[in-house]
C-alpha cells in the first residue's frame, strides 16, 4: 500500500505530548505488515522539521531530518504540483482553508494517483483523500 504522510502524523509520532500520539503510534505499527510505501513530500519534510524544532527541540529535529530519507520515500513537488496547489487555494470560486503545504500535498496525491494519507487534518477528506485508521486486524 502506498500513501502520503502529513506533518500532523509526523509531529504526533515525534511528540509524546501530542493529542494524537498514541493513535499515530497504533496506525504506524499497523503499516509495517505488510510493508507500506510511505511518501513524504519535500515541503512536508521542511514543515515537519520546522515544527519539531520549534516545539520539541533541536535534537528531535536533527534526528527527524537525519532519519527521514531512510524511513520515507521523499518526493519533490513539481512546478505543475505547485500550480495546482495555488489553484486549490485561490482558483476556486470558494477558496479552500488549506495551508500551502497541505494544498501541495493534495496536488501530489492527485499526480501520483494516491487516495490515502496518514494525517489528522479533516480537510484532507474534503479534498477526496482518505485518512488512515487503526487496522482492527492486528
Image (cartoon, rainbow, N blue to C red):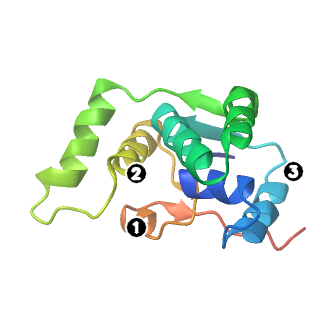
Q: Is residue 104 above or below residue 7?
A: above
Q: Which residue is mark 3?
A: 33
Residue 121, position as x, y percentages in the image:
49, 66
Q: Earlier in the sequence, mark 2 or mark 1?
A: 2
Q: Tell which of 104 and 58 is nearer to you.
A: 58
Q: Which residue is mark 1?
A: 123
What residue is shown at x 54% (from left), y 48% (from top)? 51
Instruction: Tell me: 114 left or right of 83.
Output: right
* Pointer 2 local density, CA inside 10 Å: few below 14, some 14–19, many at least 20: many
Q: Distance from label 3 to label 2 (Cα)?
A: 27 Å
Instruction: Tell me: 118 left or right of 84.
Output: right
Q: Distance from label 2 to label 1 (Cα)?
A: 9 Å
Q: Is residue 55 above or below residue 108?
A: below
Label drawn at residue 102: 2
Q: Earlier in the sequence, mark 3 or mark 2?
A: 3
Q: Residue furthest left?
A: 93
Q: Distance from label 1 to label 3 (Cα)?
A: 28 Å
Q: Nearer the viewer's eye, disc 3 or disc 2?
A: 2
**Secondary structure category for the residue under label 2:** helix
* Pointer 1 local density, CA inside 10 Å: few below 14, some 14–19, many at least 20: some
* Pointer 3 local density, CA inside 10 Å: few below 14, some 14–19, many at least 20: few
Residue 67, position as x, y percentages in the image:
75, 31
What residue is shown at x 59% (from left), y 29% (from top)? 74
What residue is shown at x 81% (from left), y 42% (from top)? 35
Instruction: Tell me: 77 left or right of 10.
Output: left
Residue 82, position as x, y percentages in the image:
29, 34
Q: Earlier in the sequence, mark 1 or mark 3?
A: 3
Label drawn at residue 104: none
Amino acid at each position: 500500500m502506498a500513501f502520503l504522510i502529513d506533518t500532523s502524523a509526523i509531529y504526533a509520532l515525534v511528540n509524546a505530548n501530542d493529542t494524537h500520539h498514541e493513535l499515530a503510534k497504533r496506525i504506524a505499527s499497523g503499516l509495517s505488515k505488510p510493508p507500506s510505501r510511505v511518501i513524504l513530500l519535500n515541503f512536508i519534510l521542511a514543515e515537519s522539521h520546522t515544527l519539531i524544532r520549534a516545539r520539541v527541540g533541536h535534537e528531535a529535529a536533527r534526528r527527524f531530518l537525519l532519519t527521514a530519507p531512510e524511513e520515507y520515500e521523499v518526493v519533490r513537488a513539481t512546478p505543475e504540483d505547485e500550480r495546482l496547489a495555488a489553484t486549490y487555494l485561490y482558483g476556486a470560486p470558494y477558496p479552500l482553508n488549506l495551508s500551502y503545504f497541505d494544498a501541495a500535498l493534495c496536488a501530489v496525491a492527485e499526480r501520483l494517483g494516491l487516495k490515502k494519507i496518514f494525517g489528522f487534518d479533516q480537510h484532507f477528506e474534503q479534498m477526496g483523500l482518505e485518512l488512515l485508521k487503526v487496522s482492527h486486524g492486528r
